[in-house]
Amino acid sequence: MKKFPWSRLYLALVFVLLYAPIFYLIFYSFNDGGTMNSFTGFTWDNYTAVFEDSRLLIIVLNTFMLAFLSALAATAIGTFGAMAIYYTKQRSTRNTLLSLNNILLVSPDVIIGASFLIFFTMIGSLFRNFSLGFMSVLLSHIAFSIPIVVLMVLPKLHEMNDSMVDAARDLGANNFQVVKNIILPFLSPGIIAGYFMAFTYSLDDFAVTFFVTGNGFSTLSVEIYSRARQGISLEINALSTLVFLFSMILVVGYYFISKENVSRRVRKNRKKREVTDLQ
Amino acid sequence: MTKIRRLYAIPYMFWLVLFVIAPVLMIVYQSFFDMNGQFSLINYQSYFASGKYLTMTLNSVWYAFLITVITLLISYPTAYFLTKLKHKDLWLLLIILPTWVNLLLKAYAFIGIFGINGSINSFLTFTGIGPQQILFTDFSFLVVATYIELPFMIMPIYNALEEMNPSLISASRDLGANSFETFRRVVFPLSLNGVKSGVQAVFIPSLSLFMLTRLIGGNRVITLGTAIEQHFLVTQNWGMGSTIGVVLIIAMFVVMILTGEKKKGGKK
């Protein structure tokens, strides 16, 4: 086309808008002036400050451990939950289960946080040794990550050929073997995608954690919130750069995993087409 | 198989009952108690009687509406142009990538950008307008909220446009429609489902962005979320907080009904 590419210009503008604040943060993480206003000189000081701040490092470690554990538990529960939904015979029950599953995905964080706070306080009044802290945060992270795992695994179940299960059964496999050797391996791409999503949900969450965390336990988001309320410290910039790089690595990893899934599916379709062509 | 199925579904069912159904019921239950733990309707009474809460709700809905409209206006062309690009998947990934950066970090970046000595203000000083108070205004809240919600609007619209059968456009052109007419009568109606889910994904969270109103809005904008956080964590009036929570849940259902897909009815 000879026309000036307005659409390209518009897209470029949107991309600049989307990335400017992030790169602004990263840029000033190298500033030795101590503010985000004027760049006075290049320095690594903010990064060394991050690595010397043991409180911050413990919080980072806690955040990742929390994400790791909650994603693991959510993936286990969610995968079997997806199977439970898939194998529910009655259509109306299945639809009810699915809409119940999606409630936590659409409800605002504040509602989830507030209702979990009421819930955990009630548990705390029943059991003396339960108090708000790591346990309540972990439980709520597991709780809000389960639905996304279910949604990631369910399409894979629909894709699965049910006669595979029948064949395994005919060949003498018991229930445990069917799940372990047939169903789970087939679902693994969906399970991995679900784990990734649960992991990032947990890393990203602020509102729910803010509600259910007690005094002793803090995650990165909560820490950033309380520091940002006090004003600007370039240590946060350095930290956010590191977090950004880490999520880049995660995204690229996730991209390749999902790409492999797609190509496998394409290959399968192609095979199917070849089969029908032959007939 | 049925027996073992019931066994492995137990944790999931536990989760469904304990973390999905019970909390919603509890928030409704809690809303009927006053500060002293006595059963009463005082929370609902004060919600409807004092104009304070009603104006706050209207305000919150109005801001959420503004955020949704602005993101929609920016997102629709973006999604439309994206579908015309060559390496679509990669570009879409670049749109999604910012959502993986923690929301608070993005808000924090804007504290620097909008600050009284920040880059926007140095630019304004440079052009001769002089520094303005940008941070802690309604304007900054709108900008940051829009910025954060943008990818959540672009994605569903992009998906809807991608799903569309391209031969429909050719058919419309063959039948003599110009490109504007094709867009108005074919492309836009077909992408409406994407727009609806985008609106749903943006409007509901916009009602509850309490961290932005604190960090960026400087408590000038009070959303429903801010009020809930205030009542639960600051004034410890859980009854009132739950009442506002119930209002927020109702608002959520209204939005979902309004933007729900009517696929079932159409097919039968």
Image (cartoon, coloured by chain):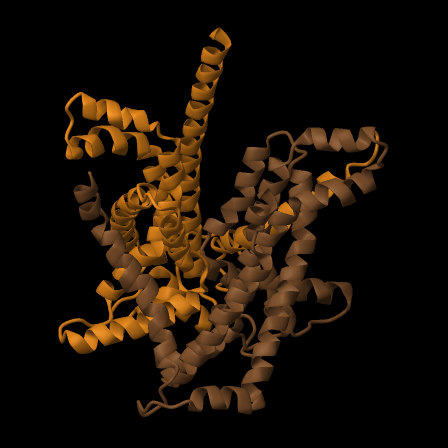
Q: Position of residue B61 (x, y in %)?
A: 60, 72
- Report the residue at 46% width, 49% height from top: B100
Q: Nearer the viewer, residue B193 or A69?
A: B193
Q: Which of A137 and B250 is in front in this view?
A: B250
On the question of residue B257 being in view, the answer is: yes
Above or below for A141 versus B86: below
Count of labels in the image = 0
Can you say which quadrant of the picture contains the C terminus of chain B? top right
Q: Is residue A246 left or right of residue A23?
A: left
Q: Position of residue A157 (x, y in %)?
A: 35, 36
* Residue farthest along the front direction in this orientation: B268
Can you say which quadrant of the picture contains the N terminus of chain B? top left
- Report the residue at 45% width, 68% height from top: A228
The chain assigned the colour brown in the figure is B
Q: Position of residue B59 (x, y in %)?
A: 61, 77
Above or below for A100 versus A152: below
Above or below for A131 versus B176: below
On the question of residue B135 being in view, the answer is: no
The chain assigned the colour orange in the figure is A
Above or below for A200 versus B94: below
* Residue farthest along the top direction in this orientation: A278
- Report the residue at 26% width, 60% height from top: A139
Q: Specify the quadrant of the image occupied by residue A259.
A: top left
